[in-house]
Image: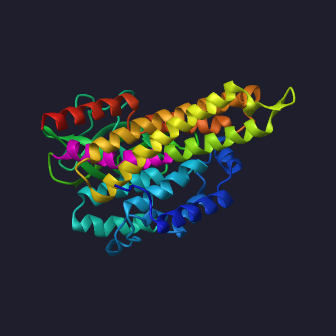
């Protein structure tokens, strides 16, 4: 079976790469990092919207481009390579995808065109503090259509217009749509290792909440949503790891000591080769995940967990070893290595850390083997 992208998708990848090279330099990423008053690059976000990327996987009848999730994976990889400081993942991978997955026809008609046009920024609010969210840790409650509770950290929660919230509803869980510009909402930005992707604490005090999906299906829908998002995040991580490898390789070829390029030394060769091996393993798992996502295959939960674990390990490893390859200057604020290290750490925790996804992978494999 061939999991490679089509010629059209490779062309899309090249176009996305060129656009981001011209419009999302590391200097722009650093500008967001160093300015607390700027949560994301608004000009870049506007350009991405104008290119139609926010509507890539949204069907044409809902105002989107009607392309495939595999096309979205291609774009995600390039966004990861560029460290794009925008709310793209929260809006597209999570909020819009949740409505595609669980929304009624009325909700799809109401919200998806606004996502496609970039009129609404979305976020997904599940966690309520440190650690892996479990049924016992979710305390937010919806009673008579009113949501009460707190969610933290919420990626892009400080800039989002609409939140998809997992909360208790009676004895079960549900997903709910909440207008973050409405009553009963209090938001406060929280610090993370990577300020180029803003996060917030959101407190709900009897905020109006619209059910999304069938009653009692909230936890199952949240798991299905995270499986889909995990593959898209994996492509971002693959893109970031590739950028690290390119940066480290270029430096190893051009930095000389004792009359030799440092890349000629075995210690540096081993670092670069190990990055490459991890990256190719992650890429293979991501491609498998893209196929599973694009075809809605039964293997999707396994493919998602495998892609997530491999990509998290690859990006973290690549970011660390890129700093080491650059030696003393790699640890400085002025050099760009730490931008990738920050993003690698953040992405490895977004939608749950490696432990959570390893446990899910093992659980899915055990279930499949029993069947």
What is the basis of the colouring in this image?
A: rainbow
Q: Residue at x 58, y 65 (%)?
A: 15
One can see residue 368 in this view: yes
Is 121 positioned to the left or the right of 292 in the image? right
Q: Is residue 187 above or below residue 370?
A: below
Q: Nearer the viewer, residue 168 or 92?
A: 92
Residue 156, given in percent of the width and then of the height, sits at 47, 47
User: Which residue sits furthest bottom?
Assistant: 61
Q: Is residue 235 magenta?
A: yes
- The span picked out in magenta is 217-236
Q: Residue at x 40, y 39 (%)?
A: 308
Q: Residue at x 49, y 50 (%)?
A: 159
Q: Residue at x 45, y 51 (%)?
A: 89
What is the chief secondary structure element of the magenta stretch? helix
Is 294 positioned to the left or the right of 172 in the image? right
Residue 176, given in percent of the width and then of the height, sits at 26, 50
User: Which residue sits furthest right?
Assistant: 259
How many marks on residues?
A: 0
Q: For the N terminus, give its image quadrant.
A: bottom left
Q: Nearer the viewer, residue 282 or 80?
A: 282
Q: For the C terminus, give its image quadrant.
A: top left
Q: Quadrant of residue 310?
A: top left
């Amino acid at each position: 079976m061939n999991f490679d992208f089509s010629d059209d998708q490779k062309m899309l990848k090249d176009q996305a790469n060129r656009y981001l090279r011209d419009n999302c330099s590391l200097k722009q990423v650093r500008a967001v990092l160093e300015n607390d008053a700027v949560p994301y690059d608004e000009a870049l976000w506007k350009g991405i919207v104008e290119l139609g990327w926010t509507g890539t996987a949204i069907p044409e009848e809902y105002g989107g481009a009607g392309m495939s999730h595999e096309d979205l994976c291609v774009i995600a990889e390039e966004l990861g390579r560029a460290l794009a400081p925008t709310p793209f993942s929260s809006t597209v991978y999570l909020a819009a995808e949740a409505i595609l997955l669980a929304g009624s026809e009325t909700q799809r008609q109401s919200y998806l065109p606004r996502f496609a046009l970039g009129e609404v920024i979305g976020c997904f609010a599940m966690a309520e503090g440190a650690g892996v969210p479990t049924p016992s840790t979710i305390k937010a409650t919806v009673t008579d259509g009113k949501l009460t509770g707190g969610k933290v950290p919420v990626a892009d929660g400080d800039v989002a217009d609409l939140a998809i919230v997992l909360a208790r509803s009676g004895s079960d869980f549900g997903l709910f749509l909440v207008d973050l510009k409405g009553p009963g909402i209090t938001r406060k930005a929280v610090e993370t290792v990577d300020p180029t992707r803003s996060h917030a604490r959101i407190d709900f005090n009897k905020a109006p909440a619209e059910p999304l999906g069938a009653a009692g299906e909230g936890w199952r829908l949240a798991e299905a949503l995270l499986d889909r998002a995990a593959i898209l995040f994996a492509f971002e991580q693959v893109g970031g790891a590739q950028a690290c490898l390119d940066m480290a390789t270029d430096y190893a070829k051009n930095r000389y000591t004792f009359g030799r390029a440092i890349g000629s030394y075995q210690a540096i060769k081993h670092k670069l080769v190990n990055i490459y091996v991890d990256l190719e393993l992650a890429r293979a798992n991501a491609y498998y995940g893209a196929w599973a996502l694009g075809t809605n295959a039964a293997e999707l939960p396994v493919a998602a967990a495998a892609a997530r674990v491999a990509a998290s390990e690859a990006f973290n490893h690549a970011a660390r070893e890129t700093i080491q390859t650059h030696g003393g200057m790699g640890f400085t604020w002025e050099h760009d290595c730490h931008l990738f290290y920050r993003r690698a750490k953040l992405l490895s925790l977004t939608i749950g850390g490696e432990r959570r996804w390893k446990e899910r992978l093992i659980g899915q494999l055990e279930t499949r083997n029993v069947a």
